[in-house]
Amino acid sequence: MEFKHLSKEVFLDLNMEFKHLSKEVFLDPNMEFKHLSKEVFLDLNMEFKRLSKEVFLDLNMEFKHLSKEVFLDLNMEFKHLSKEVFLDPNMEFKHLSKEVFLDYCLHSVTCKINFSLNYL
């Protein structure tokens, strides 16, 4: 498997599922989502629903670097993201607060449909 733009340290620490990625890996200064290509995401078969609440709260990730194509192609189920985030027209995810992550989405059909429609 090819990890195109990941640093050596991140590559060595990856364990195929986000729930197994350490806090240190995510906080690695070289680990920015803008450097992760769509192919890398798809190859890893990453599902955000596997991310624990603790991992989300520790990361302080900036999703602004993820393109809408990546979101749609991955068909990610943001289990830990609130309905407001799903329906946010900006979809930049610049500063997701702890409160947002703690506010779990119920994953209703309407929620998923509206999320998809924002990009049509």
Image (cartoon, rainbow, N blue to C red):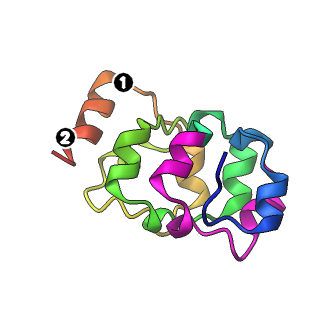
Look at mark 1 in the image and give the residue it sits on: 108
Chief SS of the magenta region: helix
Q: Residue furthest bottom?
A: 29
- Neighbourhood count class around disc 2 (C-alpha, 10 Å): few under 14, some 14–19, many 20 upward: few
Q: Position of residue 42 (x, y in %)?
A: 51, 41
95 left or right of 14 in image: left
Which secondary structure, mark 2? helix
Instruction: Relative to 87, say whether 11 is above or below.
Output: below
Give the crowd class for mark 1: few <14, some 14-19, many >=20 residues within 10 Å.
Answer: few
Give the amino acid at mark 1: Ser
- The residue segment tinted magenta is 21-43
Number of numbered discs on residues: 2
Q: Which mark is residue 80?
A: none
Q: Gap between marks 1 and 2, in whole Å?
A: 14 Å
58 and 34: which one is in front?
34
User: Which of the 4 image quarters holds residue 113?
Assistant: top left
Give the quarter of the image for residue 62.
Answer: bottom right
Question: At 67% across and 40% down in the image, what residue appears?
Answer: 51
Q: Position of residue 114 (x, y in %)?
A: 24, 37
Lower position in the chain sequence, tag 1 or tag 2: 1
For badge 2, the amino acid type reads: Leu
Q: Which mark is residue 117?
A: 2
Whether the magenta-drawn stretch holds residue 25 is answered as: yes
